[in-house]
Amino acid sequence: MFGAFRITNPLSGGLLWKIPWRLSKFQKQRHRKRLRAVDDLVSVVDTALAKKGETLKALELWKAEMPTEAEMLPKDKYTIFDRNAKRYRKGIHKVPKWTRVSQRLNPPGY
Amino acid sequence: MSFFRITLHRSAIGLPKRTRGVLMALGLRRRSQTVFHPVSAQFAGMILKVKELVRVEEVDRALSNSEVKAERTPDTGFFVERRGNATTTGEQGGLLRRGGVVREAMIMAAEEKKNSDSSRVVL
């Protein structure tokens, strides 16, 4: 009756997960806000370390490779490469824990 | 000497053990908890590992836990004008500083209770 293995339509049928195929405009806005928060954090850490004359390989790598929120294409902000999806793209919100992981780069050409 | 002021903003529930380990190493156990660490490459690397979960500022000095608490404690809304016994303050200051007077009365009552308790212990 209750618990993780209860018999409900989504669990027994399979195709009843109600995750819409695209993000709403509000989800997109909150997503951009989170991206900018990470950008700000990286810049705060960077300036603090630069004042002391120190640097960090992970930080330099991030700055060199990762685009900031403003530099990212909408396509890369809101979708992610998936080899099984039609046209090789699925919504970023299909990624597990997508609000708490960074996913900015996709394979070139896709 | 400057410090990173690190506040855990997002929970690490369901995230990999290594991520949670980094939070433990930073001393962050619960959301909205704030810790201070000196600005160094070592702590910067740890912050970058959990950059989606924390908020970071650079500050000049590390605050103690009580100072952090005082920052977010709201104003009490009253202040004690003077001490006295509960009946006289009730008459004189009751209209203006009701909250303060009530608190004074409560403190008095608590003290009386404590005294009676302690006397009972002595007996």
Image: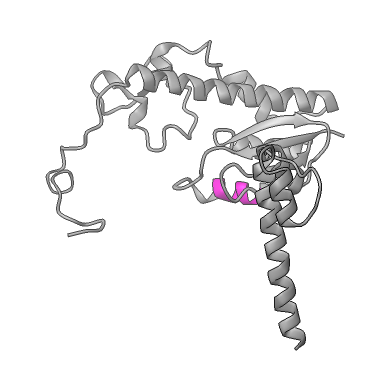
Question: In the image shown, does A68 or A25 lie closer to the viewer?
Answer: A25
Q: Tell me which corner region of the image, top left, top right, bottom left or bottom right, holds residue A57.
A: top right
- Is residue A88 shown left or right of residue A16? right
Q: Is residue A97 magenta?
A: no
Q: Position of residue A94 (x, y in %)?
A: 33, 31
Magenta span: chief secondary structure: helix
Q: Is residue B90 visible?
A: yes
Q: Residue at x 72, y 36 (%)?
A: B5
Number of numbered labels in the structure image? 0
Per the rendered image, the range of residues in magenta is: B19-25
Q: Is residue B22 magenta?
A: yes
In the displayed structure, would residue A64 be above or below residue B11?
above
Question: In the image shown, does B69 or B94 lie closer to the viewer?
Answer: B94
Q: Residue at x 48, y 23 (%)?
A: A104
Q: Residue at x 63, y 48 (%)?
A: B28
Q: Residue at x 52, y 51 (%)?
A: B17
Question: In the image shown, does B33 or B115 lie closer to the viewer?
Answer: B115
The quarter in which the N terminus of chain B is drawn is: top right
In the displayed structure, would residue B34 be above or below residue A102?
below
